[in-house]
């Protein structure tokens, strides 16, 4: 088998649900003859009918040529028996997510298809090794994990089980490219790449909600401010808490109850109560007529910072450089600018005797105790900021004041962040605030996946940007930050919470040296 050997193969798609119908469409659009089978009588015909409507809509809007639409449809034949898999070069199954059902299906197919036929599974959570176990030719079983909606999402995780023939994985990789997708190789481990690395995006928000650090609306605004298309709470509402909770539980169980992946009591309670998100009209938000309610943010800060005697900018790197520029602009009206100190060991602003410090993982209260400075506030990491890209004005950014901080400085901290161009959002004094801890944990999970041979760094980045639309891949985030600082932040969280969740990946710790 070579990378091109499936180029013209007839394809048998089993399961004509959301995913199977999409896979059949993509294969047909790429020129394959497709036979679509479903256990439910009439389901394959119905899926073809639905596709005809979709394609007609695209033709009407001028987005698709009428001939191309006609040819795509003509290539799809609803099948009424599994025996029609005979003569196909590839089977892609998208049936119910149950190990026994998938095993039984492939065992039956082995008696129908020829020896060269590849058996691909679209499973999102079951071990490819387990699906292949007991078959006569387990080497031809491979994961071909598409994302929903299949015609639009570019990513395909090509998942190899212990017995998958590397030539089969390479052929599916090449075929995915020919279908216009961006494939990545993954080892069959719990959650593969995307569903594993994404766990902390939800888990950190749920942990912050559990300790009453902020409202869902504040958490969502902070992560949208960091460039994520949707905040974690609105995203869990969209996915459905039952589905999201089931994936978290399956990754947790498959890792032998590693506390790193422990599900959240906050979400368990929502699932138990039927608060499943958009589908039940109530999750973190209430959905009336499809529009979310309950997302009010604290009143925006409008006042300018009080006049100070002395302002200095501390630290090195793009964030400190940006602070210097923005503070210079903020003070220009008063006819003076801030001093700059490069080697003070922290990043932020000193305003007379008070400090507004970039979070290094320690709470403002811990920093106040360590420095002996009472008036301290910490602000979240503006991760979207790079040397040539300042944050867009009004970017949401969390901040927290130390327990003993004066009311006056807590107000000044918000006024200064607003003057620097951010929309400051108050948070309880939680370590690592919102974005810093979430992004650090995404980086940590990705580092572990690479360390364990699940995927390469480049594939982790491609998977997270194409599979879940992250604004940057975890290793892109790491390049903008530093392994030493991420490790230090995670160690601080680890010391604060004392558990396995913030255990630093060996790969990250090695890089930090
Ligand atoms: P679905 O319920 O929409 O469709 C499944 C279809 O398979 C149904 O039409 C059902 O009648 C049919 N079916 C069940 N058992 C069968 C059998 N033994 N033989 C033939 N047909 C059978 O489900 P879906 O969302 O399309 O998911 C299908 C697979 O894709 C699952 O393994 C799922 O984990 C995976 N997946 C789903 C998504 C998603 O977002 N929905 C994303 C990636 C992967």
Image (cartoon, rainbow, N blue to C red):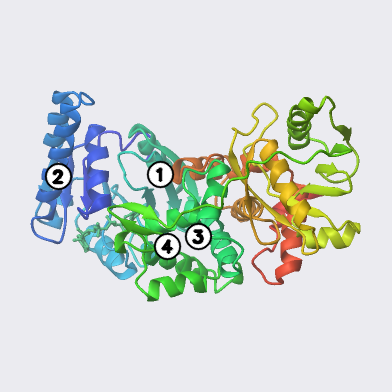
Q: Position of residue 229 (x, y in %)?
A: 47, 43
Nearest the eye: 175 or 292: 292
Q: Is residue 230 left or right of residue 501?
A: left
Mark toward the start of the polypeptide (3 vs 4): 3
Q: Secondary structure at mark 3?
A: loop
Q: Which residue is mark 4?
A: 244
Circles 2 and 1 in contact, beta carbons < 8 Å: no
| Disc nearest the viewer among 3 and 2 | 2
Q: Which residue is mark 2?
A: 50
Distance of label 3 from label 4 (alpha carbons)? 18 Å
| Disc nearest the viewer among 4 and 1 | 4
| Disc nearest the viewer among 3 and 4 | 4
Residue 156, numbered label: 1
Q: Secondary structure at mark 4?
A: helix
- Quarter of the image for residue 215 reads bottom right
Distance of label 1 from label 3 (alpha carbons)? 16 Å
Query: Which residue lies at the image location 73% right of the left edge and 41% below the top edge?
Result: 416
Mark toward the start of the polypeptide (1 vs 3): 1
């Amino acid at each position: 088998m070579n990378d091109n050997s499936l180029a013209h193969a007839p394809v048998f798609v089993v399961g004509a649900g959301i995913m199977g119908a999409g896979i059949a469409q993509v294969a047909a659009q790429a020129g394959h003859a497709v036979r679509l089978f479903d256990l439910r009588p009439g389901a394959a015909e119905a899926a073809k009918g639905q596709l005809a409507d979709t394609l007609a809509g695209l033709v009407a809007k001028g987005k698709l040529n009428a001939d191309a639409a006609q040819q795509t449809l003509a290539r799809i034949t609803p099948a009424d028996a599994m025996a029609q898999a005979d003569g196909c070069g590839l089977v892609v199954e998208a049936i119910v997510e149950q190990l026994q059902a998938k095993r039984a299906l492939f065992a039956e197919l082995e008696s129908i298809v020829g020896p060269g036929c590849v058996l691909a599974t679209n499973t999102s959570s079951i071990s490819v090794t387990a699906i292949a176990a007991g078959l006569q030719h387990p080497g031809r079983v491979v994961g071909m994990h598409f994302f929903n909606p299949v015609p639009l999402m570019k990513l395909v995780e090509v998942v190899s089980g212990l017995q998958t023939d590397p030539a089969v994985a390479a052929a599916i990789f090449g075929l995915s490219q020919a279908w216009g997708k961006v494939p990545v190789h993954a080892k069959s481990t719990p959650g593969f790449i995307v569903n594993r690395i994404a766990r902390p995006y939800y888990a950190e928000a749920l942990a912050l909600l559990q300790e009453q650090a902020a409202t869902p609306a504040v958490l969502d605004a902070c992560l949208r401010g960091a460039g994520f298309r949707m905040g974690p709470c609105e995203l869990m509402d969209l996915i459905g808490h039952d589905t999201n909770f089931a994936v978290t539980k399956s990754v947790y169980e498959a890792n032998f109850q590693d506390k790193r992946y422990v599900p959240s009591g906050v979400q368990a309670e929502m699932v138990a109560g039927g608060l499943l998100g958009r589908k039940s009209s109530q999750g973190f938000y209430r959905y009336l007529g499809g529009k979310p309610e309950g997302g009010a943010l604290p009143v925006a800060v409008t006042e300018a910072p009080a006049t100070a005697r002395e302002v200095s900018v501390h630290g090195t790197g793009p964030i400190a450089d940006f602070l210097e520029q923005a503070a210079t602009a903020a003070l220009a009206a008063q006819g003076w600018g801030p001093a700059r100190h490069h080697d003070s060991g922290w990043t932020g602003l000193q305003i007379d005797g008070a400090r507004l410090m970039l979070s290094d993982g320690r709470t403002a209260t811990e920093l106040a105790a360590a420095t002996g400075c009472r008036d301290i506030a910490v602000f979240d990491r503006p991760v979207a900021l790079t040397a040539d890209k300042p944050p867009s004005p009004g970017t949401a950014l969390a901040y927290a004041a130390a327990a003993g901080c004066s009311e006056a400085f807590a107000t000044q901290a918000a006024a200064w962040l607003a003057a620097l161009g951010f929309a400051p959002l108050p948070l309880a004094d939680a370590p690592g605030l919102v974005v810093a801890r979430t992004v650090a944990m995404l980086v940590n999970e990705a580092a572990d996946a690479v360390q364990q041979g699940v995927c390469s760094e480049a594939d982790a980045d491609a998977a997270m940007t194409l599979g879940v639309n992250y604004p940057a891949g975890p290793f892109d985030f790491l390049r903008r930050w530093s392994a030493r600082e991420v490790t230090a932040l995670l160690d601080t969280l680890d010391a604060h919470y004392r558990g396995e969740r913030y255990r630093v990946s060996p790969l990250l710790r090695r890089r930090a040296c």
